[in-house]
Structure formats: structure tokens, C-alpha cells
Amino acid sequence: MAGKLYVVGTPIGNLSDFSPRAVQILRDVDFIAAEDTRVTLKLLNHFEIKKPLVSYYEHNLREKGELILGRILAGENCAVVSDAGMPCISDPGEDLVRLAADAGVETIVIPGPNAAISALCVSGLSTSRFSFEGFLSTNRKNRLEHLEQIKNDPHTLIFYEAPHKLLTTLQDLLNVLGDRRAALARELTKVHEEVVRTTLSEAVARYTEQSPKGEFVLVLEGARPQETSAFTLEDAVFLARQLSDGGLKPSEAAKEAAAATGFKKAEIYKAML
Ligand code: SAM
């Protein structure tokens, strides 16, 4: 009979966030697929767990995935973990879960901390609908294209970023998305945990003066809905014609109607004629 695959969340800083169930699963499985075996070994040592580890990371996903699946199909239970947080979220795991699912292997999640959701919860921004954008590409063209795609998204936006790229990312966000409210959640669950609720322009100024340290999640307010006029162009033209019939010169009538309705004077004037 085939074994099972457990997707186990690990702490994003504070080891006390590791759940008793997660500890038990790591004790019970036959082996652990870990993003970085040295990082996971520290976690295992802390909880006095002894378990064989296989490395499973970005550059060996294919060959190791097949190998891990083979062991599960032969009857072993496996837990997949990443260095911090939930596997599969900007971390290895997604491919292994797909392989397991395709092979009919039962996959069970042991939920744990996740930096994006934790940051969203303390951002002070809308949590009702949000979009997780992960890391922006390091390729400038790709990152700008990504930002163009989402610039009118009304939902709260969540990004991961490394400290040495934070300032460039903030500048790109400001240039493409415009100034908007932002929360920078740093070192969550750790000693220097901090949430800076600010705006993109202030964040750029702040991190131009001081270099960012630690791990960051950026949470941004979604695009505000375009302000729409309560009037149609036909309303504006109708008003301008009435003013003109009342004695105003057409250009003055168009100007007055523009002020009253928010449409451009030239647009009204052209439509009047
Ligand atoms: N799988 C992880 C999760 O579930 O959150 C994310 C892994 S991703 C490779 C690492 C990124 O997550 C960091 O660059 C940072 O943006 C964010 N991150 C991880 N731990 C964090 C923490 N304690 N505080 C703030 N951000 C954190």
C-alpha cells in the first residue's frame, strides 16, 4: 500500500509557533523532504526529532520528485518542509504535491505560519479580498510587465522581497502603481518584529535614508476605483446648449457646463457644434 505525503508548515521565526501536530507528524513519517537539510536539521534538533532527510529544492525538483514519489508509492510516509513557513508558497512543494496527486497518493496538509497572510492580518489594510504576488522578477522588463498587469487591481496586494532589493522594488511600485497606502511587515514573530504603516512615497524616502534589514512582506492598498462623473456627455452638452440659448457665447456655455459636470470644455464645445 502506498504511503502518504504530508505538507508541513514550519515557523517563520518563532519556534514556539510549531504545532504539536506538526512535531508528531515529523516524528511519525519515514523521511522528510527538506528545502535545505541544514536548516531543517536545526529544527529537528530543537524538537529532538531524529529522521532521515532528503534535499528537495528549486534545482533538483524533477529528479528528486520522482525519487520521493517512488518511495511513497513503495509504502513510505513523507513530510515535505521548506526553510520557513508553508511549503508550496514561494517555496518548493507544489510540484511534489502535483506528482503525488497524479499518482493517486493521499496528501495531507499540516498548516503552519505563512508570512504573507500574517503580514496581511496586521497591515491595517483591507483583508476581505487580496492578491498574493510573491517575489517580483529580477528581470526588469518582466517585473514592470507584472506591475502593469496589476496596477488597476482593486484588491490588496501582497509581495515578498529580499532586503537588498526592497528599495528598488518600492521605487518601481511607486512609479507604476502610483502613491498608495502600504504596510511593511518586517521580521514577523522574531525579536525585531515591526509593522510600518505608511505610504509608498514615504517608504521610499525612509529606505533611501536607512538600509532595510531583515525579512519583509509588502502589503499595498488596491487601486482606488476611478472617480466617475454623475453626468453623461449628453447631459453636459444639453446644459451647454441651454446656457447658449440663454445668451452665453458657445465657448462660455461650454466652459460653464464643463465646470458643472467635470467633462472637458473642448469635448463639450465640439459635441455642441
Ligand atoms: N513559504 C514561506 C511562507 O509561507 O511565508 C515564504 C518563503 S519565501 C522564500 C521567503 C520570503 O517570505 C521572505 O523573503 C520574506 O519576504 C517573507 N518572510 C519570511 N519570513 C518572514 C518574516 N518572519 N517576516 C517577514 N517576512 C518574512
Image (cartoon, rainbow, N blue to C red):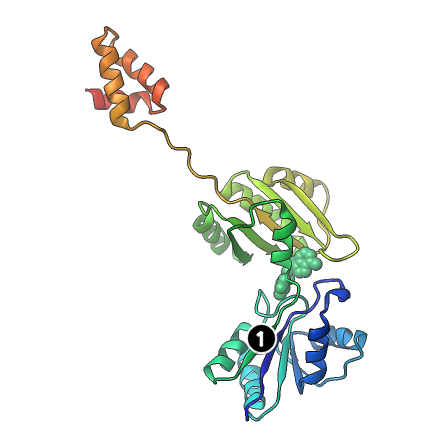
Question: In this figure, what is the number of numbered marks?
Answer: 1
How far from the left and from the top, in percent, is residue 216? 66, 54
Figure quadrant, ligand 1:
bottom right
Image coordinates of residue 133 in percent, x first then y, are 53, 56
**Which residue shows up at 53% across the image and 85% down it?**
66
Q: Position of residue 171 (x, y in %)?
A: 58, 44
Rendering quarter of residue 45? bottom right
Quadrant occupied by the N terminus: bottom right
At 52% from the left and 57% from the top, the residue drawn is: 139
Horizontal arrangement in the rendering, residue 223 relative to residue 52 (left or right): left
Say which quarter of the image contains residue 225. Answer: top left
Compared with residue 264, is residue 98 higher up or lower down, i.e. above or below?
below
In the drawing, does residue 215 fall left or right of residue 109? right
Q: Split into 4 quadrants, where in the image is the C terminus?
A: top left
Q: Residue furthest front?
A: 21
Provide residue 183's location: percent of width, then percent of height. 63, 45
Q: Which residue is at the far top? A: 247
User: With 2 as the anchor, is 214 left or right in this view?
Assistant: right
Q: Is residue 65 placed above or below 168 in the rendered structure?
A: below
- 249 displayed left or right of 120: left
Task: Answer yes or no: disc 1 within 8 Å of ligand 1.
Answer: no
Instruction: Give the residue type that dot 1 points to.
Output: His
Q: Is residue 216 above or below residue 248?
A: below
Viewer-proximal residue, 106 or 222? 106
For label 1, the crowd category at 10 Å Cα-Cα, with few meaning under 14, some 14 to 19 and many 20 or more, is few
Residue linked to disc 1: 59
Secondary structure beneath dot 1 equals helix
The residue that appears at 24% across and 26% down in the rendered structure is 234
